[in-house]
Structures are given as structure tokens and as C-alpha cells.
Amino acid sequence: MEKTFGKRTCLFLVIMIATSYIAIGPTGTVNAEVLGSHGVIAIVGNAELISLATSEGWEGNGSVDDPFIITGYDINATGVDSGILVQDTTLHLIVQDCNVYSALLRGILLDNVKNVTLNNNTCSGNGHEGIDLVDSSSNIVTNNTCDDINYGIYLLNSNNNIISHNTCPSNNYGIFLWVASYNIISHNVCSSNGNAGIFYFMDSYYNVVSDNVCTSNGRGIAFMDTCLQNVIENNTLDQNVGYGIWMGDSCANNMICGNVFMHNNGATYTYNATNIQAYSMYPNFWNTGAYGNFWSDWAAPDMDRDGIVDVAYAVNDWIRDEHPLTTPSLPGVTISTPENGTITMGSTVTIEGTANPAYDLDVNGVLVNVRNDWNFSVVISLVEGTNVVTATSGCTAFNVSDNISITYINGLQIAIDALTARLAECYDAQNQTADEVASLLENVSAMKTSLMKLSDSLNSTDANDTEMLGHLNDVINDLNATEGVLTDLLTEMQGEIDDANERIGEVYDALNATSSWLLSVSDRLAACYDAQNATADEVGSMLANITVMKTSLIQLRSSMNSTDANVTALIEYLDGAIADLSDIEANLTLVRSNLTATDDDVTGLKNDQLPLILGAAGLLLGIIAVILVIVRSKRP
């Protein structure tokens, strides 16, 4: 299979990369009231394109970086075959925002051309086709509206084109291809077309038909004759009168996967063999080997909860989708809240998101119940620093998960560290004052010692020395008194410092105790929430089993012939059992709803930590203020 589709994949990438360099206007129907009236336009060959561009004043020079631009014309093409004809050109040209109508055959015709982009034009009320490509390649047709004609967009013998984001309602065929290969037909809306939304007539190969919406047509997507090795994926086929996808004569080896089949060919949400939603005469690949398509009447059972219906969908007696999906889109998990890279000061965080299918998730080791609307919510605990939160689906056939990074900064610990630093500053200031007193005391003692040495050197019998000796003794006595005062002051200050240090230690211990207590409250709240979810998960598992059992009985009941007297009693028994299971299902749903903690409950409990933190911080600041007042009152 890799060889078969390798060439197509390379082509797809090349064309998509090339188109990323082309400026395309917004999607929308052209408003004729703001357009300039213009006659029909006929361009044959590059020389005529250059000549007309000069005479008409069209922008550009025809290069890939500066294409010619025809824009904003209202063209009434009454009496002529084509409103806009471009033939035998290779120069780069954009035709955009034009309204073309009433042509005998088609609104816009590209005949044997390359490098033309048709963007945001309206082609309605023309005789045969809205937009027609004949023998043309490497063109882009996007954002156009083609309605109320035979063929909305028509490709004949045209390859390597992109037909995307167009709207084709109320035609006979929305998009029609005949002998067309290597084209990309994507993101178009084709509705209420009498024969088919998208139709391949014959001899068309290696096309990609993806992400289109085909509703209320005669058939959604139809391949008529010898259409091989195309990819039809991720299309929505809804309420088409006939089949959602119809594969005709010699149409084989096409890959058909990821499509959504809803209520086609009279199908409902209950399987009925007379309302099969697809048709295939020849073998095609109705799944990738891992997954197939979603069928509205075949979404259960899934006993192993792997996202794949346990029983194949029968297109006919010999062709089956072996891996039908349980939901309309491929399984996936998305964490929506909080954003990746979030920084928080809370030790817990609420993780919210969606999971498809609604199977239980593992979020960092916590089993989380996903609600029927595919949403989930869980509170998890964080460690300081960077936390990687991973949500992994219980859908076992697909490795689907999502992860985000959250950085937890312990705000309470930051506050504790800041208060501790301020207390340390107070301690340093007190020590500095004590050091200053000690230094002064040391200087006084040194001065006294010097004066005493000078006094001892004087002669007490010398009259001159005697007078000086008296003055020295007076100074020494004053220094003795100062020394005593300073010594007493230093002793008192040291006592106050020791007392303050003891109180600082008590405050620090109180801060740490408060931190530990608040963190334990957070852990207990998270544990409580997890316990509630675990109980809800048990009830949810029981509910899933009841639902599967009920679905199986409904399918068995539908397969029985109610006119057969032999099975009438069994049918009555089955009807009663189905009714009983419905009652049990409703009761279990109510029980699970009551058990699951709501987001508001958990958020409220978690937010209750804030007044506790503020109250503790206020109390501790009061203690610090008292300490500082006591210390300052004791200073000299």
C-alpha cells in the first residue's frame, strides 16, 4: 500500500507547498452592487493577456511573485458562451471577486492553461457550468460559489489542480471530474445537488478527496467507472437521499477512511440492512488497517473501549469496514486549561479539556472520568519547579494524549523567606549597634589606660606635675564612670539580642508550621476530590456495561420478525428487559452525577486557603512588629 499511495502523497505535498505562496482573498459571495460593470473577457495566449492587462490597467506582470489580477467585475454574459475565457496561457493570473452570470454555457472557462487562480467569484444562472477546466493543470479554484446550474465546477482531462473551499449548492452535480487525476478536492461544501455532491465519471486516478461536506444530495460522493487508487478521507456525508459514497464499475483500490456517514440512504441511528449508507461493486480499502469510518447506525458496541466498534460494518456481503469508529472524529485528547507554560503559586491546579471518545483518562496517574459531552476536569497536586501534566486516553487502539508544562512556585515559602530575611536584618542592626557600643567601650578603656600610664610618670612632689596630676585623676574618674555605664549598657543589649534571637526562631518555626499545615490541607482536598472521582468512575463503568447490554438487546430485538408467532413471547420479554435496563441506566446516570465533584466545589475549597494564608501572614507580621518595638525601646 505504501507504493500505491506514495506518488499521490508526494504530489499532495508539492501542490500544497506551492499554493502557500499564492495570495488568496477571503471567502464570500461577491456583492454585485459594489462591482464595476464589465463586458465579457476573452484571453487567448500570453501575448493577448499582456496586451489586455496593459489596456485595462490590470495589476501585475504575469510572474509568480507579481501575477496579473482581474478583480471586481460584474459580467452579464447574455448571448455568449463564456463570461470569462482564458485559453492557451502559462503566465500567472488571478481572477477574483467577480460576478459572472447568464452565459450560454459556462461562467468561467480555463482551456489549456496553467498557473491561474480563481478566487472568490460567483457563477450562477449560467447555461451549463459555473467554472469549467478543460485540458488545464496546476491551477487553483478556491472560495468560489457556483449554484443553480448543471455542473457547479467541471474538470475534463485536467490534472494537478486544487479545488478547495468552494460552495456548490443546488446544481445537478456540485463538482464533476472526467478523466482527471492527481487533483486535490478539499474543504468544499456541496449541498442539495440533484445527482451528486462530488462525482468522478471515469478514468480518474490518484486524486485526494478530503474534508468536504456533502449534504442533502442525490448521492454524497460518487465514482462512476474505472476510478482507481484515489483517497477519500475525512469527508462528512450527511442526509444524502442515496448512498453517502457510491463506488461503481471497476472502481477499486481506493482508500476510504475517516469519513462520517450520517443518515444517508434513509439510515437512522438504528441499523437496518435495507438502509446501508455506502455502495461498492469492487474491493476498496474501507479502513487504514487501524481505523475506518464513522457510521451513524453502527457506533456500538465497544466492549474493549478502544474507539473501534467490535463488529465490522457490512457494505455488502463481501465488502466490510473492519474498523468502524465509535465517534464522528478520530480519537483525540486536548488539555484546554491551564495554558502550556503556566506559572502558578498554588500547590494544586485544575486540569480541564476534552477527550474523544469519552473514555476514562489517566492524568499523571489519576483516573479521571470523562463526561458524555467529552469534557473532563480534575484537580492534581504539583511539586515545586516544573511539572509536566499528561492526559492519556483509555482508548487502547489509538495512542492519544496531550501534555502541558506548569511551573509551581511556592508562594508561601517565598513569603516565609522574605519575612525571615527581614528578621535577619533586624538582628544584624541590633548586632551592629552592640558592636558600636563595644567599640566605644574599648576606646574608653584604652584612653583610660593611657592616662593612667601618664599619671604614673608624673612627679607628685613637683608643683607643676601636681596640678596636672589632679586634672588627670579627674579625667580618669570620668572615664571609669563612662566605662561602667557602657559595660552595663552592652550587657543589657546583649540580653535583648539573645531574647530577640529566640523570638525570631519562634516566629520562623511558626511560619514553617503554617506552611506545612496549609500544604496538608491542599493535599487532603485533592485526595477528597480523587476519591469522589474514583467512586464516580466505578459507577460510570457499571453504566457503560449496562448501556452496551441494552444496545445488544436492541440490535437483537431489531433482527427479529415480529409477525412470527413463535418469537412473539421472546420479543415481549426483550422489550421488558430493554425497558428495565433503560430505568437502571437513568438511575446510574443520576448517581454518577451526584458523586462527581463539581468544578465550582473544588475551586471553592481550594480558594479557601487564601484567607488562611492572609490571616497567618497578618498574625506573623504583628509578632514581628512587637519584637521590633521592644528592641528599639531598649536601644540607647
Image (cartoon, grey):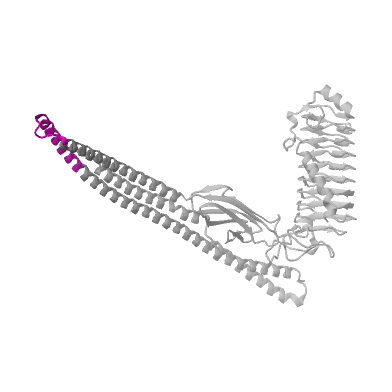
Whether the magenta-drawn stretch holds residue 2 is answered as: no
At which x and y percent is residue 60?
A: 79, 27
Picture layout, residue 192 above or below residue 317: above
User: Which quadrant holds the C terminus?
Assistant: top left
User: Which quadrant holds the N terminus?
Assistant: bottom right
| Residue at (61, 53) in percent of width and height | 403
Q: Is residue 636 visible?
A: no
Image quadrant of residue 246? bottom right
| Residue at (74, 68) in percent of width and height | 558
- Count all numbered tags in the image, as a single digit: 0
**Left or right: residue 72 compared with residue 469:** right
What span is in magenta? 457-485
At which x and y percent is residue 253?
A: 86, 56
In front here: 562 or 106? Answer: 106
Image quadrant of residue 596? bottom right
In front here: 587 or 224? Answer: 224
Image quadrant of residue 368? bottom right
| Residue at (81, 30) in percent of width and height | 63
**Left or right: residue 611 compared with residue 59:** left
Whether the magenta-drawn stretch holds residue 465 is answered as: yes
At which x and y percent is residue 93?
A: 82, 32
Q: Is residue 209 visible?
A: yes
Q: Main secondary structure of the magenta part?
A: helix
Farthest-out residue, top: 55
In front here: 498 or 409? Answer: 498
Picture layout, residue 291 above or below residue 436: below
